Amino acid sequence: MKIRRVLGILTISCLGLTSLVNAKEIKLSKEEMQKATQVYFDRCAGCHGMLRKGALGPSLEATRSKEFGTETLKHIINSGTPGGMPGWGKTGELTKEETELMAKYIQIEAPLPPEKSMDDMKKSHKILIPVKDRPKAPEAENWKDYFAVILRDVGEIAIIDGVTKKVVSVVPSGFATHITRTGASGRYMYVIGRDGKASMIDLWMKVPKNVAEIRTCNDARAIDTSKHPDYKDKYAIVGCYWPPSIVTLEADTLEPLKIVSTASYTYDTQEFTREARVAAIIASHERPEWVVNIKETGQVWLYDYSDIKNPKITMVDAERYLHDGGWDLSKRYFMTAANARNIISVIDTVKGNLVANIPSQGIKPHPGRGVNVNSKKYGPIWGSGHIGSNDIIFIGTDPVNYPQNAWKVVKKISLPGEGGGNLFIKGHPNSPYIFADRPVNPDRKLQTQIYVIDKESLEVVKTIPIPKKYLTPAKTEDGKEVASRGPVHFEFNADGSEVWTSIWGNKLKASPILIYDSKTLELKSVIDDKRLITPTGKFNVTNTMTDTY
């Protein structure tokens, strides 16, 4: 027999399995349910939803999962899919026993996750160092060239000096930090964990450390601050996956001020969804607004924080399901991916309306913030890669001077080989190149290369294989070797002369950060520190505070 429709992505030929339709009822003990719920939250909820209704990943509701049966689900969870799902077993994040537990768990109805109130938040709020006791001036010379490096699987942030390449500090954070953002001044690095724990690191300290923290929700992905000059570093915002909400905080203490629920109606079918999660947030530099993606409803909210007690929210219908995105070169237009529909939505933040829904011409666009280029041929353009296909696209973003190119794909290129796996592309005005990764491509060769795109030709001009000595596998207690995924995420230093990438390894073993010359493409240096466990995202202070990408 042939099974076509494994989690909506993978085609699996006959596996010699028993009937998948008439699977017997699965029961888990209380202890197994608790463990499985935590593993699902840690590894699966981000893409499939707390209620398992799907978004970036397909639905994992029990009735659907039962159709595949335990053995097939174990195979998928262990090996991953070409559509971008990691092989959690192959990479060592899940044991054999955990893999089987998860295969059973998703065939059982999802338990309702807990809610969270303002009182709950306040109980978790800690001012670790009062504002009056913090430095009055920077105690380090190079703090504007610091990098905040996410140590994903150990719940820490490494602060690395971009000049000396030394690890200045390692600071605890929430679980599996998703992103860090600086305030408008760059002084504080704001961190949000997938467990909803927000914290802030004072970079003016000689040894940077957390000065405040709070648990805003049970699951979160986004954080930013107020960047309008009249509200510079006054407020911080957290976007929650569960409970789906927007939480506004005092920027210097993280004291909670306001909760706004995002549970709402889908823009197209007008169906109510409790799980309307906040994905990307980006702060306007010109208006007292945050631009907020509401994933499941397909709306972009323009959240005016000038009156924090009575915020004005403009709801812009875009497309489903919204994920990540960033500014165009002018910082007027928000370019965001509705990756379940293979659409790039363009929002005019001045007029407060949808400009265009542009077919991405690939499968599951995943831009991160995207990349901006001032092209001699096309004018200002913005680019994105895809998780599910090897396409890199560039869209014209200047309707005044280049109207013939505005809001259309002006160039599409293919990364070498088959399949997607691209998570991030990155550029800098002072580098002639764009850099792309491919850490979730199943092909080992494609997974462990850096893809270099020339800004003028917009073609891949070089692939840089990662030297094998930096890909040494980790070993489990039973002697099993677990390979790293290879390079992930790029960030430039403040002047754009260097581009940094992480080797995304396993938490059993430290893995390095490789630093390349952004013009010659030569490997300049390697930061190989035993404290760097699962380094992933990297955020340079200057580039983050100015939204340079």
Image (cartoon, helix red, strand yellow):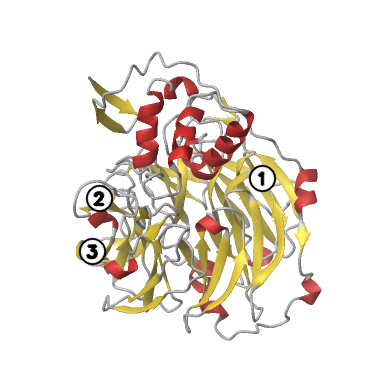
- Residue most extreme to the front: 478
- Alpha carbons under labels 1 and 3: distance apart: 46 Å
- Mark found first going from the N terminus, 1 or 3: 1
Q: Give the class, few, some or many, for how many residues have Cα within 10 Å of label 3's Cα (few <14, many ≥20).
A: few
Please name the residue that numbered disc 1 is placed on. 217
Residue 189 point in image, percent of width and height: 60, 67
| Disc 3, SS | loop
Circles 1 and 2 in contact, beta carbons < 8 Å? no
Say whether residue 96 is visible: yes
Q: Determine the residue positioned at 65% across, 56% down.
A: 198
Q: CA distance from mark 1 to mark 2?
A: 37 Å
Q: Is residue 182 left or right of residue 205?
A: left
Q: Nearer the viewer, mark 1 or mark 3?
A: 1
Element carrying mark 2: loop
- Mark 2 — residue? 443
Q: Residue furthest top?
A: 22
Q: Nearer the viewer, mark 3 or mark 2?
A: 2
Q: Earlier in the sequence, mark 3 or mark 2?
A: 3
